[in-house]
């Protein structure tokens, strides 16, 4: 079940990457996608896909998981950066 969920996320992100990246670019003030850390960018992509397509997962859970992954695999600033970008996107989607 977990493997299927992970595969769905990965395929969904790959399929919608262009649209997801446009959304990220719009909400990441002063950061161009090509300047973002690869880990942060991919955590954000997965979380945005989850926010858009996984209605059974509360937005707060998605944000918290993304922040925790950023703490574990990103830099010292990753969790704050991920939180800021995802918070803006969730608000725009009406998923506060």
Image: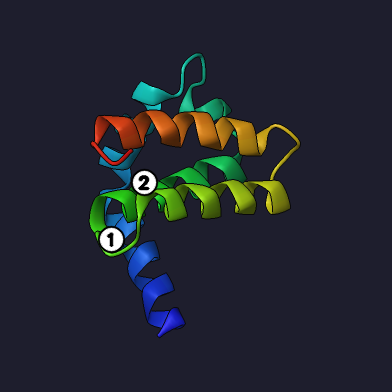
Q: How is the image coloured?
A: rainbow
Q: Quadrant of residue 1?
A: bottom left
> In the depicted view, which residue is nearer to us: 86 or 11?
86
Residue that label 1 marks: 54
> In the depicted view, which residue is nearer to us: 89 or 17?
89
Q: Is residue 46 left or right of residue 75?
A: left
Residue at x-position 37% and y-position 64%: 9
The number of numbered discs placed on residues in the rendered structure image is 2
Residue at x-position 45% and y-position 23%: 28
Residue at x-position 38% and y-position 74%: 5
- Above/below status of 2 relative to 65: below
The answer for how far apart the CA atoms under marks 1 and 2 are is: 10 Å
The numbered disc on residue 74 is: none
Secondary structure beneath label 2: helix
Q: Is residue 26 left or right of residue 85?
A: left
> In the depicted view, which residue is nearer to us: 92 or 43?
92
Q: What is the crowding at mark 1: few (fewer than 14 residues within 10 Å), some, or many (at least 20)?
A: some
Residue that label 2 marks: 48
> Mark 1 or mark 2, which has the lower sequence index?
2
Residue 50: horizontal and vertical position, in percent? 34, 55
Q: Quadrant of the C terminus?
A: top left
Residue at x-position 39% and y-position 32%: 24
Return the residue found at the far top: 30
């Amino acid at each position: 079940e977990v493997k299927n969920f992970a595969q769905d996320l990965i395929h969904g992100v790959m399929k919608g990457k262009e649209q997801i990246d446009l959304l990220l670019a719009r909400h990441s003030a002063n950061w161009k996608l090509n300047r973002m850390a690869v880990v942060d960018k991919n955590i954000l992509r997965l979380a945005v896909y989850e926010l858009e397509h996984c209605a059974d997962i509360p937005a707060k859970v998605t944000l918290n998981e993304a922040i925790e992954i950023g703490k574990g695999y990103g830099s010292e600033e990753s969790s704050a950066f991920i939180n800021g970008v995802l918070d803006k996107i969730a608000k725009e989607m009406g998923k506060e």
